[in-house]
Image (cartoon, coloured by chain):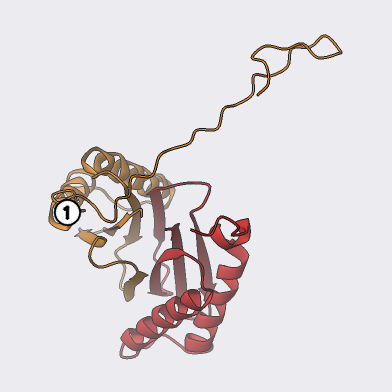
Amino acid sequence: MDEDQSAEETTFVVEEITTVIKEAVESTIGNSSYQHSKINQWMSSIVESSLSQLTKLGKPFKYIVTCIILQKNGAGLHTASSCFWDNSTDGSCTVRWENKTIYCIVSVFGLAI
Amino acid sequence: TAALYGVSFSGLYLQQPIQEVYVENTYRMGPEPGCHFSASRTQQILQAILDSYLEGVCYSPDSCSQLCQMLADLVLSKLKDVNPPRYKLVCQVVVGQSGKQGIRMASRSLMNPNTDNYTSAVFHNHSLFAVALVHGLYFE
């Protein structure tokens, strides 16, 4: 175990993760409207590209990426999460993105190994 | 090592120094046999909680955000009782109104398939739907 690892490498940095996720979402559904036939493809693409970008950061973390895509219809949605982990090293971040017809909510949980 | 009780120059009591706790290495590489995260048992617990708490509930924008958070905390507390040692839990609850909209939820994770697992449960009635998703990750 490398005792000299700096604190930056072993704590969850919210800003970095947020940027990565926003990019992944923008590049996949940027300007599209909700299309039922394409939803599966978009979901897989967002989640997989987010996860691969996160692994490229090279930090000793296990990641969970959850993505919810919702059609804008006036219906309400609530999400909540609770976690049993180590507050000093683990963290989560949620990115909300929308355009005229779609809501997209991506949550990332990072747990230190 | 400083004295337990000291008095500083100004006459105020010095705080007792906090002893750092050093935990010995357990040299354990993986969970003990029989102590893995049980996806099927967790799924039963999740489904039971959702069914019992959401039976006959109508969606309302004011109360549902609290309901959602309450469910998440409740699931976590119930799972902590049956949680095997050295497992971290992440629990997400999504509650939404049953309109005519399309919705899709997906999740992917980077974890060790030998020791880690996840499970989910879904509930819906005429006015709302709920999804509970739990991941159990082994802390190496």
Observer-nearest of B103 and B89: B89
Q: Position of residue A14 (x, y in %)?
A: 58, 62
Q: Residue at x 48, y 54 (%)?
A: A90
Quarter where residue B123 is shown:
bottom left
Question: Count of labels shown?
Answer: 1
Q: Colour of chain B?
A: orange
Q: Residue at x 14, y 51 (%)?
A: B33
Could one spot residue B25 in this view of the protein?
A: yes
Q: Chain of mark 1?
A: B
Residue A42 higher or lower than B28, as above or below: below
Residue B80 as seen in the image, left or right of residue A60: left
For mark 1, does the 10 Å Cα neighbourhood hold few (<14), some (14 to 19), or many (20 or more) residues? some
Could one spot residue B101 in this view of the protein?
A: no
Observer-nearest of B113 and A84: B113
Q: Position of residue B97 (x, y in %)?
A: 33, 61
Residue A58 higher or lower than B68, as above or below: below
Q: Helix, strand or loop at disc 1?
A: loop
- Quadrant location of the C terminus of chain B? bottom left
Observer-nearest of B50 and A21: A21
- Taking the view exactly as shown, the residue that stands out farthest to the right is B10
Q: Position of residue B105 (x, y in %)?
A: 33, 71
Who's red, chain-wise? A
Quarter where residue B53 is shown:
top left
Q: Amino acid at mark 1?
A: Ser
Q: Position of residue B102 (x, y in %)?
A: 32, 76
Per the image, the residue denoted by label 1 is B38
Residue B98 as seen in the image, left or right of residue B7: left
